[in-house]
Image (cartoon, rainbow, N blue to C red):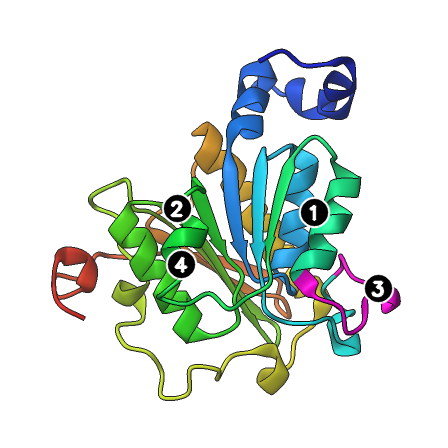
Amino acid sequence: MKFNKKQIERYSRQIILKKIGPIGQKKLLKSSVLIVGAGGLGSPIAIYLAGLGIGKIGIIDNDNVEISNLGRQIIFNMNDINKKKSIIAANKLKKINPDIIIKPFYKTLTKANINNISKNFDLIIDGSDNFKTRFLINDYCLEKKKILISGAISKFDGQVYTFNFLKKNSPCLRCFIPTMPDNPDIDNCENEGIIGPLAGLIASIQANEVIKEILRIGNTLCGNILIVDALKLSFRKVKLHKRPDCYCNGKKK
């Protein structure tokens, strides 16, 4: 593919980077990413990926915009209240970058539909706020050998982990959290609270992981979990080990 004049100008600050260049930018334009959740993590991730020139972006969310979302879900404003998050986000992303394909899904991700929705995307970003969805995405990506970049936020704390299931030695979410908590919604923002800047911080790290995974540059978080404490402004990277008795090692769930 050849860049047109507008694309050269649009992506000039990325193309000038030696680690990206014209070849890397073309890879980004040919890539596809599904974002699960258009909330505190998903909305800033979507903005960054659209700006980067990710060729196809999917956004799945079954919620409508509420006024309590506006402190951290930066793609929305007061005019969007009570409207469908995924549809509104898609419309705004097209205004940021009309060259890319945006596919909104106004529905809940389930075991019945996850393959039809996800099969045509190279990489999945988990920005969901409940363990049921996180386990569902983890198990699907493991089965289909996809790359999963997951983030979680609560109060002043955040986590990011990358699982590249193209690699046989990659651990999975169940290596870290073997079973679903009794209350799968225990850590969501509605129950625990959240500060907006933390969502932006974790989302930025997730978006950066996307670049590294697609272009195969730098050191990704694959096999590690990054733990962020926004109050102390501390970052701690912990190695995750593949458990012998885990689902990813062929054991039954």
In this view of the protein, which residue sits in the foreground, 158 or 113?
113
Disc 3/disc 4 C-alpha distance (Å): 29 Å
**Occupied quadrant, residue 10:** top right
Say if residue 19 shows up in the picture: no
Kindly identify which residue carries mark 2. 119
**Nearer-N-terminus badge (3/4):** 3
Q: Spot the residue most to the top.
A: 2
Q: Considering only vertical position in the picture, is 116 above or below 133?
A: above
Mark 1: amino acid: Ile
Disc 1/disc 2 C-alpha distance (Å): 22 Å
Q: Residue at x 55, y 29 (%)?
A: 28
Q: Is 40 on the left-hand or right-hand side of 137?
A: right
Q: Position of residue 99 (x, y in %)?
A: 70, 30
Q: Secondary structure at mark 1?
A: helix
Residue 47: which disc? 1
**Nearer-N-terminus badge (1/4):** 1
Pointers 3 and 1 in contact (CB under 8 A)? no
Q: Secondary structure at mark 2?
A: loop
Kindly identify which residue carries mark 4. 114
- Bin the neighbour count of mark 4 within 10 Å (Cα to Cα): few under 14, some 14-19, many 20 and up: some
Pointers 4 and 2 in contact (CB under 8 A)? no
Disc 2/disc 3 C-alpha distance (Å): 32 Å
In this view of the protein, which residue sits in the foreground, 132 or 219?
132
**Magenta stretch: includes residue 162:** no
Kindly identify which residue carries mark 3. 77
Disc 4/disc 2 C-alpha distance (Å): 8 Å
**Nearer-N-terminus badge (4/2):** 4
